[in-house]
Amino acid sequence: MYDYLIVGAGLFGAVFAYEAKQRGKRCLVIDKRDHIGGNVYTEEMEGINVHKYGAHIFHTNNKKIWDYVNRFADFNRYTNSPLANYQGEIYNLPFNMNTFQKLWGVVKPDEAKQIIENQKKAAGVTEPRNLEEQAISLVGTDIYEKLIKGYTEKQWGRSAKDLPSFIINRLPVRFTYDNNYFNDRYQGIPIGGYHAIIQNMLDGIDVRLNIDFFEDREQLTTSAKKVVFTGMIDQYYEFKYGVLEYRSLKFETKVMDTDNYQGNAVVNFTDAKTPYTRIIEHKHFEFGTQTKTVVTEEYPMEWKPGLEPYYPINDDKNNQIIKKYKELADKESNVIFGGRLASYKYYDMHQVIGEALTTVQNEFRS
Ligand code: FAD
Ligand code: UDP
């Protein structure tokens, strides 16, 4: 008999399992995939750590969380500075003075601010109500048209008018010449890949892979006093209030016979026509000097059962549904829900760790 059955060997499940073990609890971690790590999993190819489920850059402002992950791995000094490729023109991201200079030839922050203000006025945006209006209000129509609209509508499969503005608020807008994609104080990539972090967290804990909770739900549930569930919350409740929507992704990865394909880890393709949103060249996350390179094209698509659910779609319709599932979840005394899928939130890694540590605190309060 285990104290906890943990469904999902991703970051949430691994942090919870590690902390429970420290407190003398017996845990069984299961995952339906054939590896641990969930979406942060990295796999070695040609001596390069490949981010199998998309580029993962760790960043946080929270010293406690930074110190916490550094217990499980050393981090390098990688700073994310993606490029945008719009029909062959290259722009710096996030939106900053380098972007404005290339686009408009301006040199001073005030000149850039003036252009944005004029474009915002011409578009008639006063109180932004959706992603399109929010984007125009932040950076004007030129940048919206070249660097945001195409990318966003490919990524989400919807008009930018039908998307919540919080999605674009993830990106900084700066009037300095600073290409750092994040404002956070701490940032880096774990040396040796994310896989090593999860492996260290799960050291000495029973882990069973290739096991889908729903294929043996009753038996698995009775094997432990409590369940920690990090899968899809709507599936847990047999979709009784409806199916939560996601965006899925297809990753096309290839080894290339060159030591440097695109000169940067992340290049976004922001036009509507290119079918993928970005190309990742993995070696640049770790300043690799291998003779070959591995690149991944990322194709967004609508999620349907059988595909991996990646991005929750937090629009009004889905937010209503998740509210109802949350009400059920709050009433459970022997099931704990957490992580990106069970919370149905667009969480970054540091937020998932934060949520897991809070859950641990509540669980072991007494
Ligand atoms: P997951 O990693 O999804 O783990 C859940 C696990 O549960 C999975 O392994 C799954 O197989 C398993 N599972 C689900 N259902 C069942 C079942 N029925 N039975 C058994 N097992 C089950 N964050 C950042 O901080 N920086 C980034 O740069 C970044 N980039 C990202 C890029 C992409 C493309 C994506 C999709 C996400 C990115 N994230 C990034 C977010 C990051 O991946 C998540 O915050 C984090 O991995 C979530 O961890 P989790 O444990 O909640 O979920
Ligand atoms: N975005 C964009 N152009 C870009 C990069 C991002 O319009 O070149 C928008 C897009 O709507 C995206 C959102 O900003 O979904 C958040 O971007 P982020 O890089 O944080 O996305 P993630 O890494 O989570 O996929």
Image: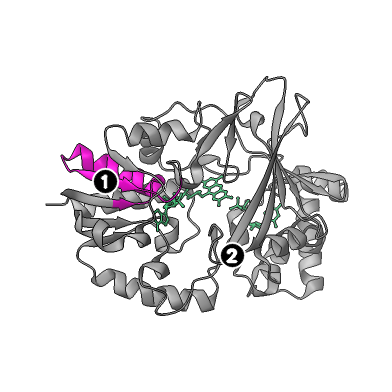
Q: Which residue corresponds to mark 1?
A: 28
Kindly indicate the quadrant of the structure image that contains residue 153: bottom right
Dividing the image into four quarters, tell me where ligand 2 lies.
Answer: bottom right
Note whether ligand 1 is within 8 Å of mark 1: no
Kindly indicate the quadrant of the structure image that contains residue 230: bottom left
- Residue drawn where x is 53% and y is 77% of the image: 316
- Image position of 218 with respect to 26: above or below: below
- Image position of 305 with respect to 190: above or below: below
Q: How is the image coloured?
A: one colour
Disc 1 is placed on an element classified as strand
What are the residue bounds of the magenta stretch?
6-33
- Residue drawn where x is 60% and y is 42% of the image: 55
Residue 296 position in % (x across, y down): 69, 41
Residue 200 position in % (x across, y down): 36, 31
Note whether ligand 1 is within 8 Å of mark 2: no
Whichever of callouts 2 and 1 sits on the residue coming sooner in the sequence is: 1
- Tell me if I can see residue 106 in this picture: no
Res. 303 mark: 2
- The amino acid pointed to by label 1 is Leu
